[in-house]
Amino acid sequence: MELTYTIRGADGNEYGPVTLEQITAWAREGRVQSQQEVRRSDMEHWSPAGSFSELHPVFAVPASVAAPSIPATPTPLRDQATEAQLKSGASWFYWIAGLSLINSIAAFTGSDWRFILGLGITQVFDAFGRDLGSGGKAMVLTLDLLSAGALVLFGVFAHKRHLWAFVVGMVLIALDGLIFLIAQDWLGVGFHVFVLYCLFRGAKACRELNAA
């Protein structure tokens, strides 16, 4: 009766039984290592593959000939927590852009309500646009769209790990926060401080990922 072999993989699973020809082929391909546990059908215990005399010839062949070279250590996995931190910070550009547009549309329609989670500069534009005609309001809405669009671009580049997008965005958000500070709108000031903190964390994560 032909002997067969069962191999215990690195994942703990057992593979086989396979013939001597098959396990020899796997060893040449580098899929079976000399120290890997193998059990032959006429044995009850596991032994290293290299201890079987019939496999000595294949393990005696230099690794460079037996199989393609394999890196000694796998490529490190991306730090998922750091990546999530970067995306969370970059997403604030989208949030501010979207909420600022909602505020602008509300102002354009004559509504008095607004989100505190928005740009101050667009609210300044909207305040000037209230007393203008339809043409002036359209111009103001265009400026609002350009402001929001700039933030969306910062978000796109920040998600692609461009550190400059975080830095420039933080500077602009800080300047925008001065509008609320001058108006003594403390809720708006607090929101801008919080956003700056989130962007700072995103920028820190971006720098760490780029340096890896």
Image: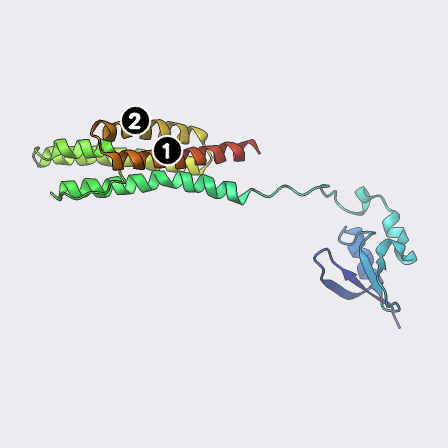
Mark sitting on residue 196: 1
The residue shown at (53%, 33%) is 208
Amino acid residing under circle 2: Leu
Q: Position of residue 32 (x, y in %)?
A: 78, 54
How far apart are labels 1 and 2 at the CA level?
11 Å
Around disc 2, counting alpha carbons within 10 Å, would you say few (fewer than 14), some (14 to 19), or many (20 or more)?
Answer: some
Q: Which residue occupies the foreground of this view, 169 or 66? A: 169
Determine if residue 38 is in view: yes
Point out the residue furthest to the bottom here.
Answer: 1
Q: Between 7 and 83, which is closer to the camera in this rendering?
A: 83
Residue at point 86% right, 51% down?
58
Instruction: Name the residue that disc number 2 marks.
Output: 175
Residue 41, by quadrant, is bottom right
Tag 1 secondary structure: helix
Percent x, y of residue 36: 80, 55
At 18% across and 36% down in the image, what residue appears?
141
Does the rendering let one see residue 153? no
Instruction: Please determine whether, in this image, residue 132 is positioned above or below residue 58.
Output: above
In this view, which residue lies farthest toward the right? 53
Q: How many marks?
A: 2
**Amino acid of disc 1:** Leu
Residues 192 and 69: in front is 192
Q: Quadrant of residue 191?
A: top left
